[in-house]
Image (cartoon, rainbow, N blue to C red):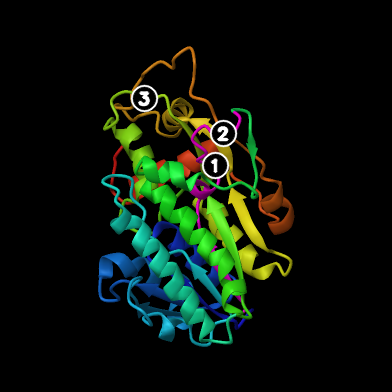
Amino acid sequence: MSATTVCVTGGSGFLGSYVVKLLLEKGYRVNTTVRDVNDAKKVAHLLALPGAAERLELFQADLLEEGSYDKAIEGCAGVFHTASPFFLANQTHESLVVPALQGTRNVLDTCARHPSVRRVIVTSSTASVYVHLGTKPADQIFTEADWSNVEGMEARGMWYCVSKTLAERAALDYPKEHSVAFEVVTMCPTMIFGPMLQPVLNESSQVVYNLLTGVTKEVPNNARAVVDVRDVAAAHIAGFEVAAASGRYILVAETTDDFEIRDAIVKAAPSALNVPTTAPPAVRAARTAVDMAKATKELGISFRPLDEMVQSTCDSLQQHGFVRF
């Protein structure tokens, strides 16, 4: 059992909770930051994890407050920075780009003050990889060498995508620019499905919820790339543990569309009565091709298929009382 101490920022979130869970299962001592340590609704699921009583400590921290991560990161060998704002409605530069950049810099500045830190794993997104807005060929196969078109995204007000791209670049550039000893590795997951540990409905699970309950009346002709939260968490930990891990890692299990997701929901919850029955159009939305070789080979990650992701998401929605079927 490892006695190594690590820090997870944003530990109460959908992904952060699983990173904490897997780290505890592997024997780590875990410091995790949350916005309010006294908010039982946000932290009770963490305190209930196996090993939490002995090896989990909660710290209150604010992304935008300089120095608020010092106590949590002190003495840690690794830091998993999963905390960053994620919402798709009413996006603004101030609500997304500013906190993502400032939060990432605050965490990295804190790591620079603590020589125990040897590697930082930063959660980015495929939003920083393949939002090319017509600047790449339609048949482009995207790899870790590709970056999204910041100028085009800014012009269109795609502030979430801008925030992830700029924050990831800043994170990867940080060790060289500041002459620090620690390494930075970034993870670029796509839309994350899978079971929820936290009792609050997160943004990506809402996609399944809306189709399952009929909030989405007509299935949109949208292509999506998806990945399971458990596999993303495992990739984060491998990014810390695998000595040769470096740079960026795209985390995509499948490229699919909302019609296939709807069909998977019908299989997962055949008694659900309000799932939309929209027939797919003759021409389906174009899917983005992604090369997953780097993550599978270097991190040893295998990915759960769509049906398993959707099944576990539906089961989780029911277990948390969001739906009945």
Mark 1 — residue?
A: 130
Q: Percent from the top left, x then y, of residue 11?
A: 41, 68
Which is nearer the N-term, disc 3 or disc 1? 1
Furthest-top residue in this view: 282
One can see residue 233 in this view: yes
Q: Disc 2, disc 1: CB below 8 Å?
A: yes
Residue at the image point whose x is 61% and y is 46% from the top: 146
Query: Residue type at mark 2?
Result: Thr
**Disc number placed over residue 279 in the picture, else none:** none
Mark 2 — residue?
A: 288
Residue at the image point whose x is 33% and y is 27% from the top: 275
Magenta highlight range: 118-137
Query: Residue type at mark 3?
Result: Val
Of residues 106 and 85, the one drawn nearer to the viewer in this rendering: 106
Q: Residues within 10 Å of mark 1 (few under 14, many from 20)?
A: many
Q: Is residue 37 left or right of residue 48?
A: left
